[in-house]
Image (cartoon, rainbow, N blue to C red):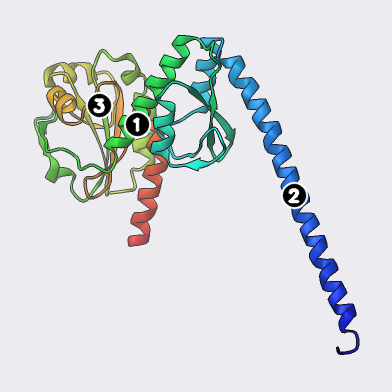
Amino acid sequence: MKPGGSVIHRSFVTGLLLLCITFLQCRNKSAEREQILNKYFSEKTTDLSGDFDKYYTYRYYNIKLSRDFIGMDSHSVIIDKMSFLKHLSGGDFMPMKIDTIPTYKLFRLPAETQSSIRQDIKRFAEKALFHAGMEGKPMPVFSLTDIAGRTYDNAAISGNITVIKCWFIRCVACVKEFPELNELVKQNNDRNDIQFISFALDSGKDLSAFLKNRQFDYVTLSNAGSFLQDSLLVDTYPTHILLDKNGTIVKYSNEFQDLVPVLEKLKEAGISEN
């Protein structure tokens, strides 16, 4: 052995041992942190499971199943979005937001959980499953007339990013969001490849009268009921749909805010193509 070789060897072994000790300490701290978080969220799940109003408030402000998220099963194993939603649709788990990324984890509901809470979780998950299932499909064939008498069909939206709103006059929530949607249009005025179209159940005459004293900056197509219900399978209003330039549905949701981050990605992709 060369002079000093044993010293180098001992130093290497010592360094390796220190590295192993540091790794084990970090792993133990990570495991301890996970135990603390699991205990906290398990207790929170139990607390929410006994009060529908408290549960619904938490769910409304924290859980956005139509947006991108990291899903974890009850054992902290990361699973894909569709698997997460299928687990959730059984009504046996509550989704808890455990990180701001966001990351949602399934926590098993106590046996005494209110039935109304279980039913709401099931409906919530089933709706998200349906929406996710519509994404990736082509826009169905349509031909409708706007309130100015112009015809719109699939050819009219080809090659453009298309933001769609499905609504009707007596839908209070649909009308209430007009100002926010007008702002979205305004924010994208500099883009010639983005168009905003609304599909309404009402007649052109009724829509013209209704919009006479209300600003709504989407192109509005009338008498779209059959198309919405039979082809786009819309059963809740408002519904918002985002199409890419190929006419493929890339986002389907009841909240227009869910479309915004996806719209930004499509815009960025368009810039990089140019």
Mark closer to the chain start, 2 or 3: 2
Q: Quadrant of residue 148?
A: top left
In the picture shown, does residue 132 fall above or below 46? Answer: below
**What is the three-letter code of the residue carrying label 3?**
Cys
Q: Residue at x 12, y 24 (%)?
A: 226
Q: Is residue 148 left or right of residue 243?
A: left
In the picture shown, does residue 44 fall above or below 263? Answer: above
> According to the image, label 3 marks what residue?
166
- Which label was assigned to residue 26? 2
Q: Residue at x 45, y 10 (%)?
A: 115
**What is the three-letter code of the residue carrying label 2?**
Cys
Where's residue 117, x and y in %? 47, 14
Outermost residue, bottom direction? 2
Q: Is residue 183 left or right of residue 60?
A: left
**What is the three-letter code of the residue carrying label 1?**
Leu
Is residue 252 among the parts visible in the rendering? no
> According to the image, label 1 marks what residue?
129
